[in-house]
Image (cartoon, rainbow, N blue to C red):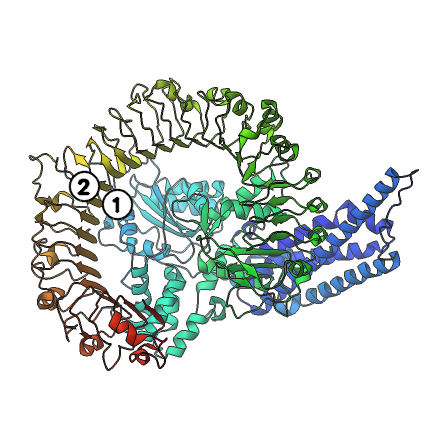
């Protein structure tokens, strides 16, 4: 392990801050002016350097030795105490300088300068500072003296033997441990296709890097690929049978080259960490001597490794939920199909959910529970944290710790926005920027990208700005931070500790923060952040008054009161929070007037507020960045547009009520063009002002996002027509009803997102929109055009080569549009066309098409993977070898007769389908199929009123089908021949009155059913389910709209030992629950619109309903 990759991480970060403060002229001048003992400063610096020399070793060993971890946490606490003391001294020094400056300014006049030390005599203050300094030195001396007992070594004495003391993964081999691998079929197929393809990489071997977080199964996948019988043994060459202990790199390379020359080989490099280009090039030299067609498969946690090796990259994701359970069950019970104790299964599902798709965690937790049948033992494992297990029994922590140990020293779940995290880092002075050419923000951006490339963070869905951290990595972070970082959740038993410095509370809608507890020293808190539980919005409350809450803080640096319910104003004591650097007052009704006293404040947020007036003198805070999402122009100067000139604005800003600008020169005075950090300027023009008003609101050339709403002018400002916004990434032009032409937006080089809507005067979009340039829109990825009521023509094919990088095209509510659409060399990722009834054209090639209420379209079936159609006229329907998802809703009957019968859907046309949804296909009588479909997993048939029969032998022809829904098909009479597929897990049958459900159900399910969820409706029975009717594998059963159902058959329910959820809906004659009660396995019961049963289950009755006792033990109960 390269020592340069191993940093002191968290402790080193704290120490660097302390060293910077110790070198501050303010500290040195203060000690000199107050005649304090400078030896104390020297001793403190010496002790901190002594501790720093042990940081690397301690950070590594904390994962193996709990005593080292406790030592490390105590050191961090003392270092923060030292930083607090140095901050106090800097504050006092600044006060003294300010007092002297004021005294000089007022000399010769009658004003009297307040004695800076009036409340604290010099001797007393000196004594206090020296006393605190000596206590810190004593604490550091005591901790330093423990180095020998803990076996800690200084950085200079760390040698090659250290690697034996680190938590490392064991050596891996090509041998597969166990024959099963779950949820990796697609990944394995991709790698094998790469191995067997005819890739011509010249004289160099082709390289593929499998990238993913620790424990996600990269090595296991590589082992299974290596041992797959489909891989030709001709490419497996044994490099050498003898061992080589030589330390002569040149000799090793020469011998390796001799063995490989002219031979075709397959090499797996497992768990690679090297990011050094030169080192890899040295290793690569003998590998280049192999024969053409050689392959190297790499597994790594770091995308930078793949970049260094110039390899292709495949990201390995977490397992899907169904595969998670199979892997866990195999290790917990020995067999996947074992039926465990229902209670243990319920706890097991919670454990599986906690593992969040990480195979290493699933295998480890399953193995811990092997041969344990006691519910209490399972509960203990579920409630435990990963670091509470010994390293001999649990290898999760060492595996994750390797990722932490390999972080550089500056980098040391929960969904979060990249921007928010970077702002927190900057506020905490986290970036130690030694390169003066780089800003703090640029440094933090690089830190974030480093963590992302090392798989610490992962992108959340399609949102490029939202990320998440796997729960187990979050647990690792909490382990490293200890109680210094504390997140409180409502109802949580664990209380905040004395050593806590960074505090956050997670609250839901109208939940109360009930205080810090008795053990917390709130004066030491550095952060207080209230966070939302989910994205549904939240407003929290506090049992204590806002005055009492503020009285708790002394050293607070970051304070977020966003969404504090009904918080109207802050107390004047906010001006006493001298260390405050970031303040979030979003949703506050009125800002305090003394915010200018917070001289360290560098970030002030007030979004979504009713604030009409910005506090005075904020412009004096030179380092302050102001974040407000709206500014409504008023009539007087205090609310005038000119005030924006005074502020260092950041983030998104909407400027409204521009009709209040009396003089257009006032708009020019706002000086928006010099607001270089104004990332998004949303000029909400609410009135039909003259063009010169918006002309004078020219934004900065560095602006990245711009939106103009409700603009009343007939032409756009020159700064948009002249394409001077070279850095513009996103542009929205909405409801500009009077404009008859669009600007030449195709010339904007960085434009990625363009949204055009509500231009009702535009009839044609001509080549001028492209800028008459063949390379127009060269960066555009997303184009949305909507609500253009008179738009008829788009001259998009006049200019060739446009939109080379377009990924998403959406055209909606353009009822008069006809003619051409862009031709794409590279298929679009998404194409949406909606409510364009007169459009007759060839649709651009796309992977994902969504068509609704549009004219007659020619589709390129060869490229698409997803097709959704609603009320669409197609000129033809053809087969596809790529289509995976097909959804047809109310197709208009204009499909050409020579292509396909209107009464039959040809399933064999689509061999690669995974999902098929047929809705409102009114003439459909049958689904024709003669071939086996190995990929189809989901089939939904809805409101096909003429459908009479399903696919032929569904059990044999659809072996992979897992989900089947059939609803509102009144002519359907028979279940498929041979029954349902054996892998079917979810079945819904509703409104099919001719189906003889009860008589044919047992035959249709068969003996080996894997069905877990069944929903049936409109059964004509009085008692249900009969014994032996339903498959024993059911975990969820829904019975609905059975008008004649009077009772439930206990014998039939009792057999369902795995049943966890039972839902009874709209059964008006269902009188009661079985006399014997419900099976103990049921943990969730829903009763809806069953009036007779509802009355027997109600608690509100004087003595309770007759069936109340039967449901008291059910955990989740819904009766309505």
Instruction: Give the residue at x 75% y 46%.
Output: 24
Q: In this rendering, which labeled residue sits more in front, label 2 or label 1? A: 2
Residue 637 in view, yes or no? yes
Image quarter where the C terminus lies is: bottom left
Distance from disc 2 to disc 1, alpha carbons, whole Å, reads 17 Å
The crowding category of the residue bearing disc 1, from other C-alpha atoms within 10 Å (few below 14, some 14 to 19, many at least 20), is few
Provide residue 773's location: percent of width, then percent of height: 38, 18
Judge whether 898 appears above or below 668 on screen. Answer: below
| Residue at the farthest right position | 108
Query: What residue would you read off at disc 2?
Result: 881
Provide residue 894's location: percent of width, then percent of height: 12, 35
Front one among 944 and 267:
944
Q: Which mark is residue 963?
A: none
Front one among 8 and 464:
464
Judge whether 664 appears above or below 252 on screen. Answer: above
The picture quadrant where one finds residue 566 is: bottom right
Position of 634 compared to 775: left or right? right
Position of 823 compared to 243: left or right? left
Residue 338 in view, yes or no? no
Q: Are marks 2 and 1 in contact (CB under 8 Å)?
A: no
Provide residue 160's location: percent of width, then percent of height: 55, 57
Instruction: Give the residue at x 21% y 67%.
Output: 1067
Front one among 1084 and 416:
1084
Query: What residue would you read off at disc 1?
Result: 193
Q: Secondary structure at mark 1?
A: helix
Judge whether 1016 appears above or below 915 on screen. Answer: below
The picture quadrant where one finds residue 1018 is: bottom left
Position of 433 compared to 986: left or right? right
């Amino acid at each position: 392990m390269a020592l340069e990759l191993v940093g002191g991480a968290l402790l080193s970060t704290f120490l660097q801050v302390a060293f910077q403060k110790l070198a501050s002229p303010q500290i040195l001048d203060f000690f000199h002016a107050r005649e304090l003992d400078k030896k104390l400063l020297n001793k403190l610096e010496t002790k901190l350097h002594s501790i720093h020399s042990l940081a690397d070793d301690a950070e590594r060993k904390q994962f193996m030795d709990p005593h080292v971890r406790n030592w490390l946490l105590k050191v961090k606490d003392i270092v923060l105490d030292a930083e607090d003391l140095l901050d106090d001294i800097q504050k006092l020094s600044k006060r003294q300088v300010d007092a002297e400056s004021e005294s000089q300014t007022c000399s010769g006049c009658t004003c009297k300068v307040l004695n800076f030390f009036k409340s604290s005599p010099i001797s007393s203050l000196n004594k206090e500072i020296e006393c605190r300094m000596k206590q810190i030195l004593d604490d550091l001396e005591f901790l330093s003296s423990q180095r020998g007992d803990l076996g800690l070594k200084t950085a200079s004495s760390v040698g090659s033997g250290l690697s034996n003391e680190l938590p490392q993964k064991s050596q891996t081999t090509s041998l597969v441990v166990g024959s099963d691998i779950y949820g990796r079929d697609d990944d394995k197929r991709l790698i094998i296709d790469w191995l067997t393809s005819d890739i011509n990489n010249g004289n160099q071997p082709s390289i593929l890097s499998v990238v993913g977080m620790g424990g996600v199964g990269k090595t296991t996948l590589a082992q299974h690929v290596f041992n797959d019988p489909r891989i030709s043994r001709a490419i497996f060459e044994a490099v050498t049978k003898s061992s080589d202990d030589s330390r002569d790199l040149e000799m090793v390379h020469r011998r390796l080259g001799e063995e490989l020359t002219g031979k075709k080989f397959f090499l797996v490099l497992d768990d690679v960490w090297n990011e050094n280009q030169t080192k890899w090039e040295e290793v690569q030299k003998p590998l280049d001597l192999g024969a053409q067609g050689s392959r190297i498969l790499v597994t790594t946690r770091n995308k930078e490794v793949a970049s260094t090796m110039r390899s292709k990259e495949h990201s390995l994701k977490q397992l899907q939920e169904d595969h998670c359970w199979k892997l866990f069950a195999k290790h917990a019970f020995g067999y996947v199909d074992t039926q465990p104790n229902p209670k243990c299964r319920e706890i097991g599902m919670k454990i599986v959910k906690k593992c969040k798709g990480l195979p290493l965690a699933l295998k480890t937790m399953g193995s811990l529970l092997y041969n344990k049948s006691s519910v209490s033992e399972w509960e203990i494992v579920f409630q435990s944290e990963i670091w509470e297990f010994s390293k001999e029994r649990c290898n999760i922590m060492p595996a994750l710790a390797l990722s932490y140990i390999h972080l550089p020293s500056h980098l040391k779940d929960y969904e979060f926005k990249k921007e928010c995290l970077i702002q927190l880092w900057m506020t905490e002075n986290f970036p130690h920027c030694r390169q003066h050419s780089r800003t703090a923000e640029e440094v933090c951006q690089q830190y974030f990208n480093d963590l992302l490339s090392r798989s610490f963070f992962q992108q959340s869905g399609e949102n490029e700005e939202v990320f998440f951290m796997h729960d187990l990595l979050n647990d690792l972070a909490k382990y490293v931070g200890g109680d210094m970082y504390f997140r409180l959740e409502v109802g949580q038993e664990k209380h905040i500790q004395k050593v806590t410095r960074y505090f956050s509370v997670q609250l839901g809608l109208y939940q109360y923060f009930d205080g810090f507890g008795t053990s917390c020293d709130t004066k030491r808190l550095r952060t207080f952040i209230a966070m939302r539980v989910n994205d549904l919005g939240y407003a929290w409350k506090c049992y204590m008054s806002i005055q009492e809450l503020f009285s708790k803080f002394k050293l607070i640096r970051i304070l977020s009161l966003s969404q504090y319910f009904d918080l109207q104003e802050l107390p004047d004591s906010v001006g006493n929070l001298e260390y405050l650097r970031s303040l979030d007052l979003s949703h506050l009704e009125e800002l305090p007037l003394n915010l200018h006293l917070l001289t360290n404040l560098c970030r002030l947020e007030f979004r979504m507020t009713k604030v009409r007036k910005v506090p005075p003198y904020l412009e004096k805070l030179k380092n302050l960045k102001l974040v407000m999402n709206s500014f409504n122009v008023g009539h007087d100067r205090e609310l005038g547009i000119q005030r924006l000139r005074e502020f260092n604005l950041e983030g998104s800003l909407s400027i409204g009520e521009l009709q209040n600008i009396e003089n257009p020169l006032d708009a020019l005075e706002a000086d928006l063009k010099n607001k270089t950090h104004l990332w998004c300027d949303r000029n909400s023009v609410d009135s039909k002002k003259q063009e010169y008003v918006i002309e004078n609101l020219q934004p900065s050339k560095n602006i990245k996002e711009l939106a103009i709403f409700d603009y009343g002018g007939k032409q756009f400002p020159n700064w948009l027509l002249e394409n001077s916004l070279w850095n513009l990434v996103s542009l929205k032009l909405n409801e500009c009803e009077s404009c008859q032409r669009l600007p030449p937006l195709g010339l904007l080089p960085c434009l990625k997102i363009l949204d055009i809507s509500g231009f009702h005067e535009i009839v044609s979009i001509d080549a001028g929109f492209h800028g008459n340039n063949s390379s127009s829109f060269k960066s555009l990825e997303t184009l949305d055009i909507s609500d253009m009521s008179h738009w008829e023509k788009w001259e998009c094919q006049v200019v060739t080569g446009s939109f080379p990088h377009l990924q998403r095209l959406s055209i909606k509510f353009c009822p008069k549009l006809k003619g051409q659409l862009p031709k794409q060399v590279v298929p679009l990722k998404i194409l949406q066309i909606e409510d364009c009834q007169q459009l007759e054209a060839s649709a651009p090639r796309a992977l994902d098409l969504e068509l609704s209420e549009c004219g007659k379209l020619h589709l390129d079936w060869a490229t698409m993977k997803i097709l959704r159609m609603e009320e669409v006229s197609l000129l033809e329907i053809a087969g596809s070898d790529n289509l995976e998802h097909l959804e047809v809703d109310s197709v208009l009957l204009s499909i050409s007769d020579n292509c396909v019968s209107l009464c039959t859907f040809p399933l064999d046309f689509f061999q690669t389908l995974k999902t098929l949804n047929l809705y409102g296909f009114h003439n459909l009588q049958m689904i024709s199929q003669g071939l086996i479909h190995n990929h189809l997993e989901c089939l939904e048939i809805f409101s096909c009123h003429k459908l009479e029969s399903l696919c032929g032998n569904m059990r044999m022809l659809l072996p992979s089908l897992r989900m089947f829904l059939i609803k509102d098909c009144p002519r359907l009479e028979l279940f498929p021949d041979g029954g349902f597929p054996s892998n079917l897990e979810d079945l819904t049958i509703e409104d099919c009155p001719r189906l003889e459900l009860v008589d044919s159900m047992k035959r249709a399910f068969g003996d080996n059913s894997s069905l877990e969820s069944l929903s049936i409706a409109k059964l004509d029975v009085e008692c249900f389910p009969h014994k032996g009717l339903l498959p024993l594998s059911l975990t969820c059963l829904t019975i609905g709209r059975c008008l004649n159902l009077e009772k439930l058959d206990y014998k039939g329910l009792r057999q369902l030992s795995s049943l966890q959820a039972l839902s009874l809906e709209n059964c008006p004659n269902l009188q009661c629950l079985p006399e014997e009660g419900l099976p103990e396995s049921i943990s969730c019961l829903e009763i809806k619109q069953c009036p007779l049963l509802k009355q027997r289950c109600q608690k509100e009755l004087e003595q309770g309903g007759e069936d109340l006792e039967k449901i008291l033990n059910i955990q989740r109960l819904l009766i309505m």
